[in-house]
Image (tube, rainbow, N blue to C red):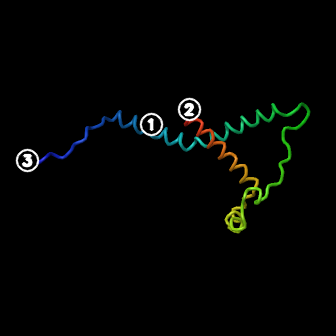
């Protein structure tokens, strides 16, 4: 008593086209989402900075100098040449770390809700 091999149901052409378009849209959104979030955050920060600045004063204040020590880097971490080769400055990394931590907090808040 031999069992017949499984034959999956056939999908029509319309179903294949809908599936393909849906997958294309999802991949596009997944790749563009970080850029959209960054633009949204930048616009939000610009609005908040403009509202917080007193009249007649510029919204941009000079940022304090950031060192590797301020970021909690020890001598071994500073010795890694990859940051120097990439020409990454400590203040750039600080901004990135602040953004990542803020995003993680928002995601955690959204997961709880």
In the picture, which quadrant includes the C terminus? top right
Label ID, residue 113: 2
Q: Is residue 105 left or right of residue 17?
A: right
Residue at the spot 41% in from the left edge and 39% down from the top edge: 20
Tell whether label 3 touches label 1 (CB within 8 Å).
no
Q: Which of 1 and 78 is in front in this view?
A: 78
Disc 1 on helix, strand or loop?
helix
Disc 3 from disc 2: Cα separation: 55 Å
Residue 31 spot, x, y in % from top left = 55, 44
The picture quadrant where one finds residue 74 is: bottom right
Q: Which of marks 3 and 2 is nearer the N terminus?
A: 3
Q: Give the class, few, some or many, for how many residues have Cα within 10 Å of label 2's Cα (few <14, many ≥20).
A: few
Disc 1 from disc 3: Cα separation: 42 Å
Disc 2 from disc 1: Cα separation: 28 Å
State the residue position of label 3: 1
Figure check: 48 above or below 73: above
Q: Which of 27 and 13 is in front in this view?
A: 27
The picture quadrant where one finds residue 52 is: top right
Q: Between label 2 and label 1, give the one nearer the viewer.
A: 2
Q: Earlier in the sequence, mark 2 or mark 1?
A: 1
Residue 102 spot, x, y in % from top left = 66, 42
State the residue position of label 1: 22
Q: In this view, does 80 lie to the left or right of 13?
A: right
Residue at the spot 67% in from the left edge and 65% down from the top edge: 82
Q: Between label 1 and label 3, give the one nearer the viewer.
A: 3
């Amino acid at each position: 008593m031999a069992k017949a091999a499984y034959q999956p149901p056939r999908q029509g052409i319309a179903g294949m086209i809908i599936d393909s378009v849906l997958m294309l849209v999802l991949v596009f959104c997944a790749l563009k989402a970080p850029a959209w979030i960054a633009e949204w955050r930048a616009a939000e920060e610009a609005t908040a900075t403009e509202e917080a600045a007193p009249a007649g004063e510029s919204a941009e204040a000079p940022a304090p100098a950031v060192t590797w020590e301020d970021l909690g880097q020890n001598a071994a971490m500073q010795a890694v040449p990859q940051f120097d080769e990439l020409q990454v400055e400590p203040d750039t990394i600080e901004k990135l770390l602040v953004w990542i931590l803020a995003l993680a907090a928002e995601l955690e808040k959204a997961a709880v809700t």
